[in-house]
Image (cartoon, helix red, strand yellow):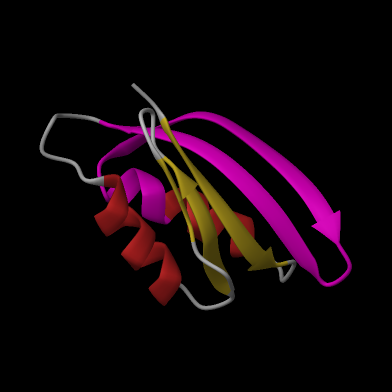
Amino acid sequence: MSDTIHIQIDRADGSLQRLIGLVERRGFHIDGMSLSDEGAMRRVQMQVRGRDDGRCTENLGRQIDKLIGATRVGYTASTQSYGAAA
């Protein structure tokens, strides 16, 4: 069961690689990802699922918020939706 995280990230060199590395290090699989460029920023929609039942997507979102140049702007769970304004 995948959840979707909506992220805004700067287009600096290596920013997307840092985001993907963070997701994988936190114990999540990336099931799908789409990107769209918006000027100096990039909007990313990432479908993720935990490697095991103990993984919480909300905790992953908090870690993404701490990543320099990245801001989580929304979250869609498999069963419910959440959204946060940037």
Position of 73 with respect to 75 (left or right) is right
The quarter holding residue 61 reads bottom left
The N terminus sits in image quarter = top left
Magenta stretch containing residue 40, yes or no? yes
Residue at 32% over, 38% down:
28
Foreground: 81 or 23?
A: 81
Highlighted range, magenta: 22-50
| Residue 83 appearing in the image | yes
Q: 21 left or right of 62?
A: right
- Number of on-image labels: 0
When asked about the image quadrant of residue 10, the answer is bottom right
42 up-or-down from 1: above or below: below
The residue positioned 58% from the left and 57% from the top of the image is 7
- Residue 14 visible to the viewer: no
Q: Which residue is nearer to you in this view: 48 or 86?
A: 86
Vertical side of 81 occupied by 69: above or below: below
